[in-house]
Amino acid sequence: MAVREPKRLAAGALYDYAVRSLARGSLTVNELRSRLSRRAARVTSVDEVIERLRSAGYIDDARLAESYAFFRREYEGFGRHRVLRDLRKRGVDSELAQQTVSSTYADADEATLIHQQLKRKLGEGYQEKPISEPKKVLSLYRALIRAGFSSDKIVEALQQISPDSDWLETVAQHHDDSEQEVFD
């Protein structure tokens, strides 16, 4: 079955399409530009529509980044690394994303956020039930890394609920080394 090309839109219809897209959910300028580029009859219409939306206050990456970071921290309990990675992936300027995440997490206690994640995953009173299975501990470690927390804080939290988990420090060191290679 052949993939149908989307209908190409003139500037006015492209603007309406953009407003409908934004009504469905917040988009970064980059995400919106990508959507509009696939539908625009003229390439120059994309910049015109984006500028018009910016002027009207319909799109603002700084405002989106602030609300996104706040929501991800407060309601989903994610760590700063995850939120920063997600903002960059959505096309928010790297410097803006870094500033936003820094200010959003300025008063956040990472250990508290980690314990909240563990409570979600393991249930109330999880600290009274030691975990002795290395596979389970490693699974929790990986989940917390994906959630955006630093490996040293994760190790501290997991060592509180898992006897004989000194081996976690080796796992964390290996993870930190491989992360450093990615950024070098």
Image (cartoon, rainbow, N blue to C red):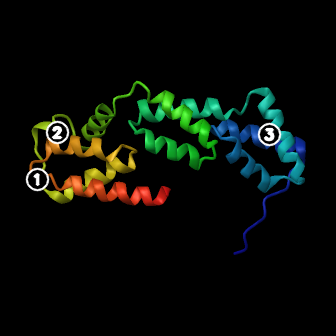
Q: Amino acid at mark 3?
A: Ile
Q: Classify residue 24 as left or right of residue 160.
A: right
* Extreme-front residue of the structure: 184
Label 3 sits on a secondary structure element that is helix
Q: Amino acid at mark 1?
A: Ser
Label 2 sits on a secondary structure element that is helix
Q: Front-most of 24 and 28? A: 28
> What is the C-alpha distance between the residues marked 1 and 3?
55 Å
Q: Front-most of 90 and 19? A: 90
Q: Which numbered mark, 2 or 1, is in the foreground of this view?
A: 1
| Residue located at (35% from left, 54% from top) | 176
Q: Which mark is residue 132?
A: 1
> What is the C-alpha distance between the residues marked 2 and 1?
13 Å
User: Where on the picture, by quarter, is residue 118?
Assistant: top left
| Residue located at (13% from left, 47% from top) | 162
Q: Amino acid at mark 2?
A: Tyr
Seen in the picture, residue 47 relative to 67 is either above or below; the reply is below
Disc 1 and disc 3 in contact, CB within 8 angstroms: no
Label 1 sits on a secondary structure element that is loop
| Residue located at (65% from left, 40% from top) | 27
Mark 1 Cα shell of 10 Å, populated few (<14), some (14-19), many (≥20): few
Residue 90: % across, % down: 60, 47
* Extreme-top residue of the structure: 107
Mark 3 Cα shell of 10 Å, populated few (<14), some (14-19), many (≥20): many
* Extreme-bottom residue of the structure: 1
Q: Quadrant of the N terminus?
A: bottom right
Residue picked out by circle 3: 50
> What is the C-alpha distance between the residues marked 2 and 3?
49 Å
Mark nearer the N terminus (2 vs 3): 3
Mark 2 Cα shell of 10 Å, populated few (<14), some (14-19), many (≥20): some
Q: Which mark is residue 126?
A: 2
